[in-house]
Amino acid sequence: MRRVGMKTCWINRNGRKWKGDVKPTYTINCLEDIKYLLRLKEKNKAV
């Protein structure tokens, strides 16, 4: 929920369209993809 400053991640395994009011920060296809997001976070932390 961006309204409170929290980043969110939607696991969209079936390629559906998001129907919620607040869009997720990230959309991934499988749980394995979360590793990429965590690496990005670590990379940005080092800067």
Image (spheres, rainbow, N blue to C red):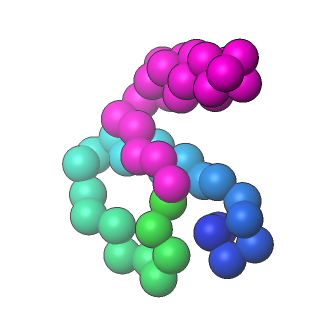
Q: Is residue 39 left or right of residue 10?
A: right
Residue 33: x %, y % from top left: 45, 24
Residue 9: x %, y % from top left: 55, 48
The quarter of the picture where the C terminus appears is top right
Q: Nearer the viewer, residue 23 or 19?
A: 23
Q: Is residue 28 above or below residue 45?
A: below
Question: How many labels sit on residues?
Answer: 0
Residue 39: x %, y % from top left: 58, 17
- At a point 49% along the width and 20% down the height, the residue shown is 36
The quarter of the picture where the N terminus appears is bottom right
Q: Nearer the viewer, residue 46 or 12?
A: 46
- At a point 44% along the width and 77% down the height, the residue shown is 20
Residue 18 sits in which quadrant?
bottom left
Q: Is residue 41 left or right of residue 40?
A: right
The answer to whether any part of residue 38 appears in the image is no
Give, as a single range, the part of the protein colored magenta: 25-47
